[in-house]
Image: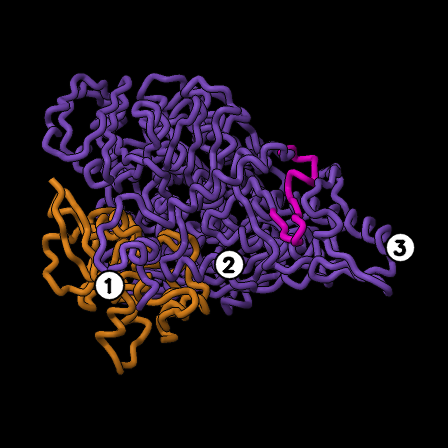
C-alpha cells in the first residue's frame, strides 16, 4: 500500500512526512491538461485538411506513430479499434501508436462522433492515410536500400531487404509525407488475411486504467489557478431573471463572483464544494413562465404542431387506390414514443481558460470542431482564437450537455479572468441536457388475403435545420449572447421508409416547426422510433394475416438482399424459432411468456440486424420482464469482435431500459424528472440475457455498430408482449399501467 | 475558516484543510487528495459512482459528510484496492471480462462488489445474488452482463 495516493506522492516525499496538507488543485489531472497544452507549438504547422495524409498521422524519429482523429472515443472502444486499424495498415506494433482525439488545433474535422460512423467513415479515412503512408515508406525504403519494392518486407515499422534494413523513423522521422489522400477513391488496403489485429478481440487499451482509478476523465482534469463554477438554471425554461441577492451566499467561504448575464446566472468559487453550496443557496427571483404543453396531452400537442415541411421518404405505386379496392383488409394504428434524456452517469463537465484573448476549452464534447464555431459565435471571437480539446467523459450517447457546460465555463471564465471548471449537478443534467423529442406515428396498411398490398406511414417529428447539426448552446440562449437559431434533432427521418418491397408504399415525415423541449439526438435517433412503429405494424399485419412473423417478413424482403435474409435466418436458428402465428396459443395463468422478432437494415443502406426478444408478462401487475435477447448482426468487416459484442450488449440493455421505463416528465414550466428516482433506468436484476451471433465479412467494408442494434429493441419487445398476451403495446415506455390499460381494453 | 481534518485513506494518514466540516467525503477525496477512483455521479446516493469503503463497508461518499467520519475510520478507494501493475482480483477480473465501456460507473461496481464478496467470503454466490447486491448501482452503457461475469470469476 505505498503508491496509493498517486497525485500526492511527490508532496509526501517533499514534506518528508506521511502527514501533509494537500493543495486544492489535484496533481494528475493538472499534469494531463498541461501536457496537452505543451503539445501546441509542434502542432502549429500541422495540416488539418481531410485530403492530406499528414493531417491524420505523423511518425517521429523513434518510429512512434501519432494518429490525429477527429472522431473520439465516447467509451465505445473506438480508440482501441483505430489503433488496431493503423497498426495493421502501417505494419507497426500497436504499442507504437498513440491516438490524439478531437483537438481542433491538431485533428482534422472528420465530423461529429455520431451516427455510428467512427469506424465506417472516420476509421477508413485514417486507414486510407495509413495505407498511403506505408506505400510511400516502402518506396522510400526501396531507394534507400537500393532494392526493388517486391524484395522488401515490412514488420514492426522496419523495412528489410536481402541486404539491409531501415526503420520508419529513419525514413520519415519528424518529416511530413506531403501526400494527398482522396477518400472518394481510397487506395488499396491490405488483404484482410494479412491483418494481425483487425478481426481479433484485442483487449481495450483504456480498461486497466479505468478499473484502477488511474484514468483521467474530463471530470478529473485540473488547470493551474483554476476556479470552480456552477450554474443556477431558471425554475422555468423561459423565465426572466429579475433579481439576485448576492448577500444570500455571503457566509459561504471562497466565493469569487456571482456572474449574471441576461438570464444566465452562475457562481464561481475557490472550491467545488463552495460553488455547489453557493449555487444551492443563492437567492434569485424569476418571472413566471408556463410555455410547455400539458404532459398528459403531449401527443395531441405534437399532432397539432405546425408542419414546416413534408419529406416523402418512400413512394411506390398508388397507396390510396390500392387501399380503396374491394376485398382488401385494412388496418390502422397509431404509435408514440416518449421524450428521453441521455442519462450519462457523470453529469457534463468542462473547463475554460482565456489567455491573451484566446479561449481554450476542455470538454467531453462529441463534436469539438462544431463546438469551436459555436463558442466563437457566442463570444464574438475569431474561430481560430478558440481551441476545443476533447477529454473522455462519462458515456456519451448523443449530443448531451457537454457543449452546454463548455459554454457555461467559457462565460464564467471570461467573467473572472481565470480558468473555470464547471461541473453540472445531476438536476442540471436531467433537467437541461437536450432531449430525444417525442415521436408520433400513424400507420395504415391493406392486405389482400395474407399478402401485403399497401402501406402508408406518417411520422410527426421535429424539423432539422438543413446541414446545421448545431444544438443551440443553453448559455448563449439564456444570456442573450449570439446563439445559433437552429433546431437539431438529427437525421430522424432515417428508417421511416421500410426495408421491404411490395407494390404500394408511402412514407411521409411531417417535419414539425417545433417540439416542447430543446431537442437533440440520442443513440439511434429516429431510426429507433421509426423502426419501432414499422416493425410493430409489420407484426400486426402478420398476425392479421395469420402468418408466422418471420415468414411474413421474408415474403416481402427483396430476394436480392441476401445479407438481410441471412440475419433473419441466423436469429431464427439462434432463438430456436418455432414457426407459427402470434399470439401464442394456449397461454393461461397470470404469468405468460412470448417471443417477438424485429428486423432492420440501418438507414436502408448498411448494418443488418435481426433480433428475437423473449418476455414474461405478469398480467395482474402489468409488469414486463425481458428475459432474453437473441441478436444476429452483420456490420461487414469486424474490427474487434469483443468490442462489437460490448456495443451490442449495451444497445440492447440501454434500449430495454428506454422501452420499458424511461420518460421525461415535465410541468408547464420545466422538466420535473431531475434525478434517478424520477427518471429511473434499468437495474441489474432486470437485465436480460443476451445471445449474439456475429456475421463477420472480412473482405467487406466495415459499417457502424454503435447504434443499429438498438433500433430493433422496442418493436421486438412489443411484438413479444403481443405474442404472450394478445395485447398490442403502441406507446413507449411500456409501463405496467399502460400494459394493464391495454389488457383491459382487449378484454 | 479553514479546519484541519485527519483521515486515513488507502493506508496513509493524511491531514486536509477544509472550510466546511460537513463537506461530503467525495470532495475531500477528489479535490483535497486528488484521487480519481471515486466519481461524482448524482450527489444523491442514487447511482453508486462515488462508492468507497469505510472500514470495509461500501459507502456512498457523495452523501457522507466528513463530520460523520470517526478517528480511526479507514477509507479505501479504488486506487487503494490495486494498481494496473498489481490489480486486486476483482480489478483483474474486470480486465479479463472487458467489463467496461465508458467505465464511469465501474468504480462503484468494483467497490460495491469487493465489499459484498468480503462480507460473503467462502460462500458460493449465484448471478442472481450478485445482481441483487448491485441493484442500486447504475450503469448507462449497458455493461451489466460483463460486470456480473467478472464478479463471478473472483
The chain ID associated with circle 1 is B
Residue at x 32% of width, y 49% of height: A734
Residue at x 86% of width, y 65% of height: A162
The chain ID associated with circle 2 is A
Q: Position of residue A216 (x, y in %)?
A: 40, 50
Horizontally, residue A482 falls left or right of residue A1, namely right
Q: Position of residue A612 (x, y in %)?
A: 47, 60
Q: Residues within 10 Å of mark 3 (few under 14, many from 20)?
A: few
In contact (CB < 8 Å): disc 1 and disc 2: no
> In the figure, the purple chain has which letter?
A
The residue labelled by disc 2 is: A205
The residue labelled by disc 3 is: A146
Residue at x 67% of width, y 64% of height: A196
Q: Residues within 10 Å of mark 1 (few under 14, many from 20)?
A: some
> In the figure, the orange chain has which letter?
B
In contact (CB < 8 Å): disc 3 and disc 2: no
Real-space CA distance between mark 3 and mark 2, rounded to the nearest whole angstrom? 39 Å
Tell me which label, 3 or 2, sits earlier in the chain: 3
Q: SS for tag 1? A: strand
Q: Position of residue B99 (x, y in %)?
A: 42, 63
In depth, the one of A209 and B31 nearer the eye is B31
The residue labelled by disc 1 is: B12
Disc 1 with disc 3 on a shared chain: no
- Tell me, yes or no, if residue A446 can be seen here: no
Residue A133 is inside the magenta segment: no
Residue extent of the magenta highlight:
A48-66
Which quadrant of the rendered structure holds the N terminus of chain A? bottom left
Residue A55 is inside the magenta segment: yes
Amino acid at each position: 500500500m505505498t503508491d496509493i495516493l498517486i497525485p500526492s506522492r511527490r508532496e509526501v516525499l517533499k514534506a518528508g512526512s506521511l502527514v501533509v496538507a494537500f493543495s486544492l488543485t489535484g496533481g494528475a489531472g493538472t499534469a494531463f491538461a498541461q501536457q496537452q497544452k505543451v503539445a501546441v507549438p509542434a502542432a502549429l504547422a500541422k495540416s488539418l485538411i481531410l485530403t492530406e495524409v499528414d493531417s491524420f498521422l505523423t511518425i517521429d524519429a523513434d518510429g512512434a506513430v501519432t494518429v490525429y482523429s477527429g472522431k473520439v472515443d465516447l467509451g465505445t472502444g473506438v480508440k482501441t479499434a483505430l489503433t488496431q486499424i493503423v497498426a495493421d495498415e502501417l505494419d507497426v506494433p500497436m504499442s507504437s501508436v498513440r491516438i490524439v482525439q478531437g483537438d481542433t488545433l491538431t485533428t482534422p474535422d472528420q465530423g461529429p462522433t455520431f451516427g455510428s460512423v467512427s469506424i465506417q467513415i472516420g476509421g477508413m479515412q485514417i486507414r486510407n492515410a495509413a495505407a498511403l503512408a506505408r506505400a510511400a515508406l516502402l518506396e522510400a525504403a526501396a531507394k534507400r536500400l537500393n532494392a526493388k519494392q517486391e524484395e522488401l518486407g515490412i514488420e514492426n515499422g522496419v523495412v528489410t531487404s536481402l541486404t539491409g534494413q531501415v526503420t520508419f523513423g529513419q525514413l520519415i522521422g519528424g518529416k511530413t509525407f506531403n501526400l494527398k489522400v482522396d477518400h472518394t477513391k481510397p487506395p488499396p488496403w491490405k488483404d484482410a488475411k494479412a491483418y494481425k489485429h483487425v478481426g481479433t478481440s484485442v483487449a481495450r487499451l483504456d480498461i486497466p486504467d479505468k478499473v484502477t482509478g488511474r484514468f483521467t476523465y474530463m471530470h478529473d482534469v485540473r488547470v493551474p489557478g483554476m476556479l470552480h463554477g456552477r450554474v443556477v438554471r431558471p425554475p422555468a425554461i423561459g423565465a426572466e431573471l429579475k433579481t439576485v441577492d448576492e448577500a444570500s451566499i455571503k457566509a459561504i467561504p471562497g466565493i469569487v463572483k456571482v456572474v449574471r448575464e441576461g438570464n444566465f446566472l452562475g457562481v464561481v468559487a475557490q472550491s467545488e464544494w463552495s460553488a455547489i453550496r453557493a449555487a444551492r443557496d443563492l437567492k434569485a427571483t424569476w418571472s413566471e413562465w408556463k410555455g410547455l404543453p400539458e404532459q398528459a396531452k403531449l401527443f395531441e400537442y405534437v399532432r397539432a404542431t405546425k408542419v414546416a415541411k413534408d419529406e416523402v421518404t418512400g413512394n411506390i405505386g398508388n397507396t390510396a387506390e390500392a387501399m380503396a379496392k374491394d376485398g382488401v383488409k385494412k388496418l390502422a394504428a397509431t404509435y408514440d414514443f416518449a421524450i428521453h434524456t441521455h442519462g450519462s452517469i457523470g453529469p457534463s463537465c468542462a473547463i475554460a481558460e482565456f489567455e491573451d484573448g484566446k479561449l481554450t476549452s476542455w470538454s467531453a464534447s462529441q463534436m469539438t470542431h462544431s463546438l469551436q464555431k459555436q463558442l466563437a459565435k457566442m463570444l464574438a471571437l475569431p474561430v481560430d482564437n478558440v481551441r476545443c480539446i476533447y477529454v473522455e467523459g462519462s458515456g456519451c450517447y448523443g449530443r448531451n450537455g457537454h457543449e452546454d457546460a463548455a459554454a457555461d465555463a467559457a462565460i464564467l471564465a471570461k467573467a473572472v479572468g481565470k480558468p473555470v471548471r464547471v461541473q453540472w449537478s445531476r438536476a442540471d443534467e436531467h433537467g437541461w441536457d437536450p432531449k430525444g423529442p417525442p415521436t408520433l406515428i400513424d400507420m395504415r396498411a391493406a392486405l389482400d388475403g395474407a399478402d401485403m398490398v399497401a402501406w402508408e406511414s406518417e411520422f410527426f417529428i421535429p424539423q432539422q435545420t438543413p446541414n446545421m447539426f448545431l444544438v443551440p448552446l443553453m448559455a448563449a440562449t439564456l444570456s442573450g449572447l449570439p446563439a445559433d437559431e437552429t433546431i437539431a434533432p438529427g437525421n430522424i427521418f432515417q428508417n421511416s421508409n421500410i426495408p421491404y418491397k411490395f407494390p404500394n408504399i408511402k412514407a411521409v415525415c411531417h417535419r414539425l416547426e417545433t417540439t416542447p423541449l430543446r431537442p437533440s439526438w440520442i443513440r439511434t435517433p429516429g431510426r429507433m422510433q421509426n423502426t419501432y412503429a414499422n416493425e410493430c405494424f409489420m407484426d400486426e399485419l402478420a398476425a392479421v394475416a395469420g402468418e408466422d412473423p418471420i415468414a411474413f417478413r421474408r415474403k416481402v424482403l427483396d430476394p436480392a438482399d441476401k445479407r438481410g435474409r441471412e440475419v433473419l435466418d441466423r436469429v431464427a436458428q439462434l432463438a430456436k424459432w418455432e414457426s407459427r402465428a402470434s399470439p401464442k396459443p394456449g397461454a393461461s395463468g397470470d404469468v405468460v411468456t412470448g417471443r417477438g422478432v424485429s428486423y432492420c437494415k440501418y438507414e436502408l443502406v448498411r448494418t443488418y440486424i435481426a433480433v428475437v426478444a423473449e418476455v414474461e408478462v405478469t398480467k395482474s401487475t402489468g409488469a414486463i420482464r425481458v428475459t432474453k435477447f437473441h441478436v444476429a448482426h452483420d456490420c461487414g468487416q469486424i474490427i474487434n469482435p469483443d468490442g462489437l459484442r460490448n456495443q451490442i450488449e449495451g444497445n440492447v440493455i440501454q434500449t430495454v431500459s428506454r422501452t420499458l421505463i424511461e420518460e421525461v416528465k415535465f410541468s408547464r414550466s420545466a422538466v420535473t424528472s431531475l434525478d434517478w428516482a424520477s427518471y429511473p433506468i434499468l437495474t441489474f436484476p432486470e437485465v436480460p440475457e443476451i445471445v449474439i451471433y456475429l456475421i463477420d465479412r472480412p473482405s467487406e467494408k466495415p459499417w457502424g455498430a454503435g447504434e443499429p442494434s438498438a433500433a430493433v429493441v422496442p418493436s421486438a419487445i412489443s411484438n413479444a408482449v403481443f405474442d404472450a398476451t394478445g395485447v398490442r403495446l403502441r406507446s413507449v415506455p411500456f409501463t405496467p399501467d399502460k400494459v394493464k390499460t391495454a389488457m383491459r381494453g382487449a378484454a | 475558516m479553514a479546519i484541519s481534518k485527519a483521515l486515513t485513506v488507502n493506508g496513509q494518514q493524511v491531514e486536509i484543510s477544509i472550510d466546511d466540516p460537513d463537506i461530503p467525503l467525495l470532495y475531500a477525496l477528489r479535490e483535497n487528495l486528488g484521487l480519481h477512483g471515486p466519481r461524482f455521479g448524482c450527489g444523491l446516493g442514487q447511482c453508486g459512482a462515488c462508492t468507497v469503503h469505510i472500514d470495509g463497508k461500501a459507502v456512498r461518499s457523495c452523501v457522507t459528510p466528513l463530520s460523520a467520519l470517526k478517528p480511526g475510520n479507514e477509507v479505501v478507494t479504488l486506487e487503494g484496492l490495486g494498481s494496473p501493475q498489481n490489480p486486486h482480483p476483482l480489478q483483474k477480473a474486470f480486465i479479463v471480462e472487458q467489463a467496461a465501456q465508458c467505465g464511469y460507473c465501474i468504480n462503484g461496481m468494483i467497490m460495491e462488489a469487493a465489499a459484498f464478496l468480503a462480507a460473503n467470503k467462502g460462500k458460493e454466490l449465484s448471478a442472481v445474488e450478485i445482481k441483487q447486491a448491485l441493484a442500486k448501482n447504475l450503469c448507462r452503457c449497458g455493461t451489466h452482463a460483463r460486470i456480473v461475469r467478472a464478479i463471478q470469476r473472483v
